[in-house]
Amino acid sequence: MTEEVSSSESQAGPAVSVVAPGDGETIVLGTTRMRVLEDGSHTEHRLAIAESVLAPHTQGPPQHRHDRHDEGFYVLSGTVRFTVGDRDYDATAGTLVMVPPGTPHTFANPTGQPAVMLSTFTPDLYVQYFRDLQDVLTDGRPLIPQANIDAMSRYGTEPAAGQAVPPAPAGARRHRRTPEGQVARDGE
């Protein structure tokens, strides 16, 4: 049960968000299952948090860099291999990995056991990237590298291998955050 709890009847201000075990939005991307615990709607879009379960032998996204947000990963169980540039780091339970904007990175689960990690995104806009990828899969389209690159480009992200991000397909628009914190497509 996801609910908002006011901290005091007499105090004005934002409500506290409580997400119970098993609650939250679920996004499935191949062998990765993500549970969105906070999509930014309770943090004035400053922070989003997700729990991800990576099945055994899951390859992660292509190495990429973000130009607009920090990304944090806290490994809860299992082992997650982070590749940052040309260096690999095997992160076990209790390890925190913080990735600032501009840093090339990716992650994977190279082991035969599931791995679980908690991820943070500041600001929150990148949660919509995962929703977009799920939409591609739900529509029956394969998640080919080009579809992933196209989705990345809408959220200030590009492949790290020095490849230029190709132009978005005809009719596609980039997303931006309105002053009110809503997601909008450019041109709206």
Image (cartoon, helix red, strand yellow):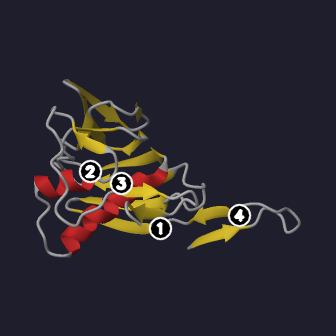
Q: Secondary structure at mark 4?
A: loop
Check whether the beta carbons of the residues at disc 1 and disc 3 lie within 8 A of each other. no
**Which of disc 4 and disc 3 is earlier in sequence?**
4
Going 10% across and 58% down the picture, which residue do you hit? 144
Q: Which residue is mark 2?
A: 152
**C-alpha separation, residue under disc 1 versus residue under disc 3:** 12 Å
Q: Residues within 10 Å of mark 3 (few under 14, many from 20)?
A: many
Q: Who is closer to the viewer here, 50 or 134?
A: 134
Between disc 4 and disc 2, whose residue precedes?
A: 4
Which residue position holds label 4? 15
* Depth order, front residue of 130/159: 159
Which dot marks residue 37? none
Q: Nearer the viewer, mark 1 or mark 2?
A: 2
Q: Specify the amino acid type for callout 1.
A: Gly
Q: Mark 4 or 2, which is nearer the eye? A: 2
Badge 3 is on which residue? 52
Residue underneath mark 1: 24
Determine whether the residue tagged by mark 2 lies in a helix, strand or loop: helix
Tell me which amino acid carries mark 3: Ser
Cα distance in 3D space between marks 4 and 1: 17 Å
